[in-house]
Image (cartoon, rainbow, N blue to C red):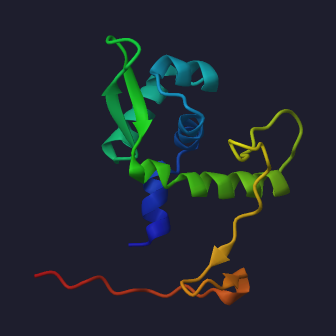
Amino acid sequence: ACPIARSLDLVGEWWSLLILRESFSGVRRFKDFEQRLGIARNILSTRLKKLTEAGVLERRPSTEDAREVDYRLTPMGRELGTVLIALAQWGQRWTDQSGDAPCFVNRHSGSALQPLQLIDADGVVLQLRDIAMVVEKAAASG
């Protein structure tokens, strides 16, 4: 019932998150995911199938080659962008920074992003200490 557990069940595997990262960078074809990630074909195939069945990605005929299939983010998948940015910002702050690491910037200006903020429905910027987790009852069926 926990939305975090349900979300991790869909996209929480290490390779799945990296596939999504590449999707946000414009990668669409199986061979390009394989090459960019250095992932085994069978694992890539399994992860793409799971992400497609979950509605995070969709398969479409390629616009460049009719023999190929493109994997594109759905609206559901695009909403994961904020999650990936939050995870990347956390990683930039708290993990080893050796080597080249991708980061997210404004596509038009190249400016770095500010850290994500938590804002309530009234527009108030919150700190974690200001937030409580409550259980909402599911709507009654029938």
Q: Is residue 30 left or right of residue 118?
A: left
Percent x, y of residue 101: 79, 37
Instruction: Look at 55% across and 31% down and name the residue there.
Output: 26
Q: Is residue 6 left or right of residue 141?
A: right
Residue displayed at 56% across by 38% down: 15
Total labels: the figure holds 0
> Residue at image x 59%, y 40%?
21
Q: Quadrant of residue 47?
A: top left
Image quadrant for the C terminus? bottom left
* 103 relative to 131, above or below: above
* Location of residue 89 with respect to 56 vertically, above or below: below
Q: Nearer the viewer, residue 43 or 22?
A: 22
Above or below residue 89? Residue 1 is below
Q: Is residue 17 left or right of residue 139?
A: right
Task: Tell me the quarter of the image containing the N terminus.
Answer: bottom left
Q: Which residue ends up furthest to the right in the rendered image?
A: 98
- Work out whether residue 46 or residue 91 is closer to the camera in this orientation and state it: 91
Q: Which residue is found at the position 63% from the left and 78% from the top?
A: 119
107 lies left or right of 98: left
Q: Farthest residue in the left direction?
A: 142
Residue 98 position, x and y percent, is 89, 38
Q: Position of residue 10 (x, y in %)?
A: 43, 51
Image coordinates of residue 100 in percent, x first then y, are: 83, 33
- Where residue 71 sits, quadrant-wise, is top left
Q: Residue furthest front?
A: 108
